[in-house]
Image (cartoon, rainbow, N blue to C red):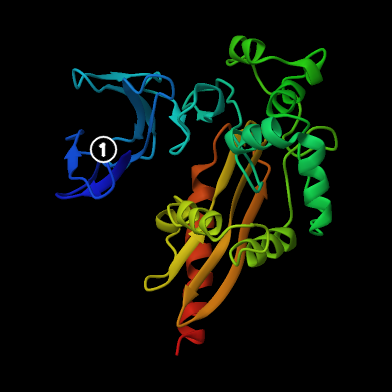
């Protein structure tokens, strides 16, 4: 398995071949590696994401395990989602006027997770679950392909294929990600309701599943991007989307400190003509951190 460990100035990718086994460092880069995942069939390579100099313009790279060679997979100019390592699921924001493809917005799960849920359970079962736990204002698409097809105004978005999505990667989004047709959105109330129960295992049959759910949320980028207050165990999964005319950022989750749980959802939708809106994103992060810090200070023992 691949893990991230910091021995010097930045987190790097290490390989652990067995439980309790030694860590073998694979990357030796000046910049922090944010995520890594093996190629699922042969394991002969893995893809990792990193930026340069903390600029947050994340790029995806392929690491050849046999040779140690590193190959840039993205164009070196676009801003790709830090945690997305599957070609069909990463978001892109270019510093030019080119359109971007959305990865996820104000949603419970990114498309890669939704795709897995749909594959094993089907969208109808996922929708039934959402309704059964009382998330009345949470909307999901029929599939991630249909979502992207709808945004691109495809002729038949319900049968939109991954091949068609790849061919349309540089086309502009026609419909807004927040719409009444195919969308992936929720409300702060639904997020807090979901996380306040999920983090205590209400939706899981096995303790091991809850532990893994908590582990994944403890790795969320939003923890250090905001940042969340120091001294609290933080669990969050942020999401964002940028298309010309519409921008959304969402960071729901929880903090645990002094044996006390605090649940939150920080979210913003803004409508600016530019393809990206970094100034609003920076202000949103600062406001979120400023809001949560006194909460911890006031409730701490």
Exactly how many numbered labels are in the figure?
1
Query: In screen coordinates, is 72 left or right of 133?
Result: left
Residue 170 position by quadrant: top right
Picture quadrant of residue 262: bottom right
Can residue 136 be seen here? The reply is no
Binning the other alpha carbons within 10 Å of mark 1 as few (below 14), some (14 to 19) or many (20 upward) gives: few
Which quarter of the rendering shows the N terminus? top left
Q: Is residue 183 visible?
A: yes
Which residue is at 35% across, 31% downward?
Answer: 48
- Quarter of the image that includes the C terminus: bottom left
Give the image location of residue 118, x and y in percent: 70, 33
Q: Is residue 284 above or below residue 240?
A: below
Name the residue carrying label 1.
17
Q: Secondary structure at mark 1?
A: loop
**Residue 3 in picture, x, y percent from top left:** 30, 43
Report the side of 185 relative to 181 (left or right): left
Q: Residue at x 37, y 19 (%)?
A: 42
* Residue 225: x %, y % from top left: 42, 53
Seen in the image, is 171 located left or right of residue 237?
Answer: right
The front one of 58 and 165 is 165
Q: Picture coordinates of residue 107 (x, y %)?
A: 66, 46
User: What is the residue that sits farthest to the bottom in this orientation?
Assistant: 301
In the image: residue 47, left or right of residue 268: left
In the depicted structure, whether residue 255 falls above or below residue 267: below
């Amino acid at each position: 398995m691949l893990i991230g460990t910091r021995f010097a100035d930045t987190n790097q990718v290490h390989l652990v071949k067995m439980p309790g086994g030694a860590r073998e460092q694979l990357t030796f880069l000046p910049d922090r590696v944010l995520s890594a995942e093996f190629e699922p069939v042969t394991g002969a390579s893995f893809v990792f994401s990193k930026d340069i100099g903390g600029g947050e313009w994340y790029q995806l790279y392929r690491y050849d395990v046999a040779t140690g060679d590193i190959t840039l997979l993205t164009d070196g100019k676009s801003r790709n989602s830090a945690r997305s390592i599957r070609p069909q699921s990463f978001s892109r924001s270019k510093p030019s006027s080119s359109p971007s493809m959305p990865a996820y917005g104000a949603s419970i799960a990114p498309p890669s997770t939704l795709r897995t849920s749909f594959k094993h359970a089907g969208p109808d079962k996922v929708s039934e679950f959402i309704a059964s736990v009382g998330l009345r204002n949470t909307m999901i698409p029929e599939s991630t392909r249909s979502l992207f097809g709808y945004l691109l105004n495809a002729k038949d978005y319900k049968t939109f294929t991954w091949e068609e999505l790849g061919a349309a990667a540089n086309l502009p989004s026609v419909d807004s990600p927040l719409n009444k047709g195919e969308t992936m959105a929720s409300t702060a109330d639904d997020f807090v309701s979901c996380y306040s129960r999920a983090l205590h295992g209400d939706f899981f049959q096995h303790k091991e599943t809850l532990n893994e759910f908590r582990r994944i949320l403890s790795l969320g980028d939003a923890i250090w991007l905001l940042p969340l207050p120091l001294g609290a165990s933080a669990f969050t999964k942020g999401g964002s989307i940028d298309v010309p005319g519409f921008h959304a950022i969402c960071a729901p989750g929880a903090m645990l400190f002094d044996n006390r749980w605090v649940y939150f959802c920080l979210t913003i939708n803004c409508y600016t003509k530019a393809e990206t809106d970094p100034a609003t994103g920076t202000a949103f992060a600062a406001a979120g951190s400023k809001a949560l810090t006194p909460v911890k200070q006031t409730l701490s023992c």
